[in-house]
Image (tube, helix red, strand yellow):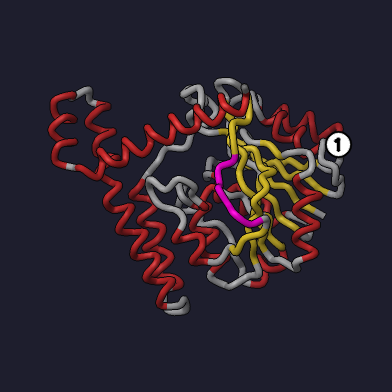
């Protein structure tokens, strides 16, 4: 059985879409755990209404707003299923996701299994492409695979995946999300899980529909996304990991973390530019760009990726 955990905060406009995508699964052996993180809108009422109509749905109310890590941990601690699957409240599953993932996971005896991400553009309300460009149907997903394939400017970052986890594996090593981080907490959790060398894989096929904070085609910002990019938190999370686990991981894994930290340290300059632009200081921004070619290269990469995404979408649509 799957335990599908949906952390929710002020999600009244989209949580039904998430829950319904689970209820419509071709595999019906699941429970849904909605963890409300002290919402101030109608999320709780909606969740309780859905729970009253289907006894597979359970609702948990947080006394204080603790962030997504805390909510996910409440879900894991109360889960009854063999498999843990996370679903953010503004995202959705393809109807066959649980069935397809379970078959591969059980056939391969995996402890952790990822699928690719289907990007969803809220501006045009359509799926606009697969986030990962993978050659094989089933790919390795080790600690090094994760760390070496997620950094600023990479075309297909691995950190956006939403794996399914074997619950016994998480409990064996007492693995939970670190509540100290509200940004990058999922990547830190994946690092911790993979550091215990589970049998893991990454599928080329995508079944998880991820709502982009900014539509790759429309350019419209999603009002649903409240995630604020924080490069310093990402660096801090890696420092936390090294302090906690550094002695037991392999030298090449420590090296990979250091290299990733260097890349994100350079990326703090992008955050500086955002702050300058927020102050509407155009002249300061111009001279800042002259002095920081890394930021110029990063902006150009993002621009070319946006153009490529639009081109691919319209070619596919025509």
Q: How many marks?
A: 1
Q: Residue beneath label 1, please?
A: 54
Look at the picture and state if 106 lies above or below 1: below
Which residue is at a point 40% across and 61% down the rendered structure image?
238
* Residue 148 located left or right of residue 9: left
Rendered image quadrant of residue 126? top right
* Rendering coords of residue 121 (x, y %): 56, 27
Figure quadrant of the C terminus = top right
* Residue 46 located left or right of residue 161: right
Look at the picture and state if 13 lies above or below 225: above
Nearer to the camera, 220 or 226 = 220
Which residue is at a point 82% across and 40% down the rendered structure image?
25
Figure quadrant of the N terminus = bottom right
Rendered image quadrant of residue 163? bottom right
* Rendering coords of residue 38 (x, y %): 58, 36
Look at the picture and state if 287 lies above or below 35: above
* Residue 151 located left or right of residue 27: left
Judge the density around disc 1: few (<14), some (14-19), many (≥20) Cα neighbours within 10 Å.
few
Which residue is at a point 24% across and 35% down the rendered structure image?
273
Nearer to the camera, 124 or 279 = 124
Q: Main secondary structure of the magenta part?
A: loop
Q: Which residues are magenta?
A: 130-136
Is residue 145 a member of the stretch shown in magenta? Answer: no
* Rendering coords of residue 8 (x, y %): 62, 37
Nearer to the camera, 284 or 293 = 293
Secondary structure type for disc 1: loop
């Amino acid at each position: 059985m799957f335990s599908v955990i949906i952390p929710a905060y002020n999600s009244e406009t989209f949580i039904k879409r998430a829950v319904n995508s689970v209820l419509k699964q071709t595999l019906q052996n699941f429970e849904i755990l909605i963890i409300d993180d002290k919402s101030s809108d109608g999320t709780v009422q909606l969740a309780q209404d859905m729970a009253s109509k289907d006894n597979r749905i359970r609702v948990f109310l947080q006394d204080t707003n603790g962030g997504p890590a805390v909510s996910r941990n409440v879900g894991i601690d109360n889960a009854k299923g063999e498999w843990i699957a996370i679903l953010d409240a503004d995202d959705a599953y393809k109807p066959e996701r649980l069935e397809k993932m379970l078959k591969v996971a059980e056939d391969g005896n995996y402890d952790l299994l990822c699928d690719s991400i289907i990007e969803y553009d809220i501006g045009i309300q359509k799926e606009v492409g697969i986030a990962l460009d993978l050659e094989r149907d089933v790919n390795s997903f080790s600690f090094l695979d994760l760390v070496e394939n997620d950094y600023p400017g990479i075309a297909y970052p691995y950190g956006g995946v939403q794996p399914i986890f074997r619950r016994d594996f998480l409990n064996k090593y007492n693995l939970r999300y670190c509540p100290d981080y509200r940004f990058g907490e999922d990547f830190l959790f994946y690092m911790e899980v993979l550091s215990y060398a589970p049998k893991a894989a990454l599928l080329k096929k995508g079944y998880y529909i991820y709502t982009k904070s900014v539509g790759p085609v429309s350019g419209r910002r999603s009002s649903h996304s409240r995630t604020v990019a924080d490069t310093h938190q990402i660096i801090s999370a890696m420092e936390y990991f090294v302090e906690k686990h550094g002695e037991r991981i392999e030298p090449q894994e420590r090296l990979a973390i250091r290299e990733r930290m260097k890349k994100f340290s350079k990326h703090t300059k992008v955050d500086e530019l955002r702050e300058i632009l927020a102050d509407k200081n155009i002249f300061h921004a111009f001279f800042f760009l002259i002095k920081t070619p890394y930021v110029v290269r990063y902006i150009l990469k993002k621009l070319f990726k946006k153009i490529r995404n639009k081109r691919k979408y319209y070619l596919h649509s025509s």
